[in-house]
Image: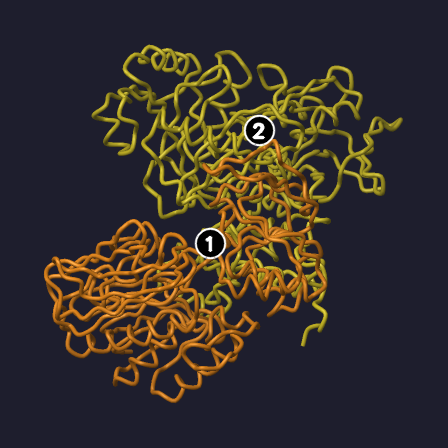
Chain colours: A orange, B yellow
Amino acid sequence: MNFDIVVVGGGPAGMAAAYSASEKGSKVLIVEREAKLGGILNQCIHNGFGLHYLGEELTGPEYADVWQKKLLKTKAKVLLSSVVTKIERLGDRNVVVHIKNSEGVSKIKTKAVVFSMGCREKPGSAINLCGTRPAGVFAAGEAQKLVNVHGKLVGKKVVILGSGDIGLIMARRMTCEGAKVVGVYEIMPKCGGLARNVAQCLNDFNIPLFLSTSIVKIVGDKRVSGVVVAPVNPDFSFDLTKQKLVKCDTVLLSVGLLPEIDVLNEFNLERSNVTNSVVVNQFYQTKIPEFFVCGNVLHVNDLVDNVTVESLEAGVCAANFAKTGKTTKKPIEVKLDKNIRYTSMKYVYKNTGSVTLCFRVSDEFKNAKIVAKSGEEIVASVFKPVVRAGQIEKIVVDTSKLKNDLNLCLEVA
Amino acid sequence: MKTFDVLIVGGGIIGTNLFSLLARNGVKVALLEKEDDICGLVSRANSGVIHAGYDPRPNTLMAKFNVEGTKMYPQMCKRLGVDFVSCGSLVVAKKEDKKKLEELLNRGKQNKVPDLEILGKKDLQKLEKNLADNIEFGLFAKTAGIVSPYEICVALAEEGVLNGGKVFLNFEVKLIEKQENGKFVLSNGKEEIAAKFVVNCAGQHAAKINDLAGAKHFKMNFVKGEYILLDKAEKGFVNRPVFPLPTEKGKGILANITTHGNILLGPTAFPCKLGDTSVTLEGINKIKQDVLASVKQPNFRKTIKLFAGVRVKSGSDFNISRDEKQKNFYYAVGVCSPGLSAAPAIAQHFLHLLKEDGLKTKKIIVKKRKPYTNTEKLSEKELDKLIKKNPNYGKVVCRCENISQGEILEALNSPLPAKNIDAIKRRLRPTMGRCQGSFCRPKLVKILSDFYKTKEEDVTLNGKGSEIVVGNIKGGIQ
């Protein structure tokens, strides 16, 4: 079977990329490992999806449904319950994707591949979570799946480690199901999730948030019986003089996401130490021109709306490349000052129209001016009364103004 | 009352070796294990190294059984259909420590270890790219290798069952009595099982079992060994176990591989209480620091699991014997490293003692264990053929380790069926990969509850009390 584009992963990113590529006239196949499209959206039964892009607040499954309907109106083919086991690049626009499902093993020839596999949750050990290893310790998203999809309660007295959005949302969800959430513990001095989630998920339910505090160790033999918590010093060591035992039967971990990019490990593509993913240019394209990357597997977004916007662009870029095979030469590296953690795109090109750079700042800043400089000239700037590390920020740069460099800086006015 | 010729207490590496050996020799044998699966504690979490045998002091049981056992491993693994990675091992040293390496080499020669060689920097670099800069010499032991200790225990137990042996899980021996006819009766408080011979291979509970039987009393010490496991993406950081020079406290913290391609760093050696496998920050920091004596900085950002095992000690040597007071009672007490390497030879030794004491063996037609399908090892053509025959092999349950529903069903239908999530893990590795089960654990709960026709609430991580979910949500399930 031959396609122009194979999209790996049928979550919000994959659906948007497949949709836009298909609309551009490409012959698209989307490969999804689960039995239905939508990815993690299917377990996110809370609302708040689509506010920016669709102008209405939907639940996760509803948002997925909107895009699935759009996608099914195109000519894109969907392959469910199927995994990509291997990718081979044979030459210019000549890629073979190996697929396994309950019908067997097949090979699909394609001109380009869009990688949109999303993330996995960081396990406790990855953040040096010590103690015993009993039942009752869950990644927050895993618990979300058990509760919302399997209809199963995972525990009755819950401690949550990490104040990322999944942790906050699960704090509310567990409370609504009758569990007692005794606290959300965050090692950093600031909450990791969106402000609206702190208000709606913690404050409205009187769930305490303990900042600069973390779990020293898990306690319990067969099932969790508690956690020892302690404040952390500025160097992130524990202040063990103030440690105490908090009794609970469940620990949910919301301690970060890692890109599910491992199918690309063998290609030795340039990586980012911040996102842990591969880096792309303004066309969402890697050093291997046939490979495009978008959505949370590229960088963890705050809102699904941003994933959709980014992935629609990536789909168009992949479609253009599949059609023409054209690549742009002489990349300009986007250089960042210390206040900016990363940009979704590392390389841009002169005279390629306007490009939207998504980025995250390293801390909370008030009256922040974000400036894009090329040569001595300011080519774009944005003013924000407040920027936070948890949120994605954007700046639009006109590439016709570029000299031979691009520096992104955050200045506090 | 169920009666056997031989009862083995404890389903670790020695117990399962002896179990399989006796079953294959036509002996009516049963294995009593206190946990919900075999390979419960000591044998489960260790470095998986089959040591060449240069380390134990000459003329000890450790030296004898280590060298004999290691010789048996390649053939045994082949028979069982489990991996033996014949990678050799390295002990590395700085320039000024060459003498200590030579001492080890000489000890190895006294222990009759074949194929030992001290290599210089140039040859070392051909074997390992990431040795610490100040490493000048290394003792290369070609006969050493790597196994998966829990896979071997499972395979041996299955082989024993296939050949007529019986396994009793969740059977904690609480009482041992001797009847007038000389037979032992072992009870867990509910059920009694009798046998003429009893072999105590109870790991960290071995001293207690000896006491219950009125056999020789031992004082045991427990030593915790913590480990850091890295993602398979780090494969090649080292290609074999790389040891520092051994000290009084043990073999030190090594940079090691697993049979599945992960990098394994550890163990620490802290005195601990019975059963304490908790991981400490102190231990993790010690590994991170001490491993740098032998290798360059590992990529700890790729840590996927911290875990710990317990080593048991009683005196400076293994205590493996027939009891002097209690006739027809045998014990293996304080079998620490190199116990994994020594286990097949220890089992042979027990068989020898049992036969001396009147155990009758008979020739049977030995049934060969069928290893689990490993779809990752099949060519695409073979896999395609298999899936067309049975579509379950195309349904991926564990995405990180690429394990299909078909493989998992094999573990549930095996001669010693997996009854909980950890038991499936030890047979096939789901929940052991880079996501540590956050994607597949909910699926495994469902698979286990469907297979055993129980509620999902009854599915456990590793036996009663370790249930994963506690009930339905308020609205119930559609």
Residue B226 visible in the current orientation: yes
**Both labels 1 and 2 in a single chain:** no
The subunit carrying tag 2 is B
Regarding mark 2 in the picture, which secondary structure is present there?
strand
Which quadrant of the figure has residue A247? top right
Quadrant of the frame with the N terminus of chain B: top right
Residue A90 at what x, y percent from top left?
A: 19, 65
Q: Which residue is mark 2?
A: B224
Residue B425 at what x, y percent from top left?
A: 55, 50
Horizontal side of residue B273 vs A281, given as left or right: right
Regarding mark 1 in the picture, which secondary structure is present there?
loop
Quadrant of the frame with the C terminus of chain B: bottom right
- Residue B322 higher or lower than B24, as above or below: above
Residue A24 at what x, y percent from top left?
A: 26, 84
Q: Which residue is mark 1?
A: A256
Task: Kindly identify the amino acid type of the residue bearing the numbered disc 2.
Answer: Lys
The subunit carrying tag 1 is A
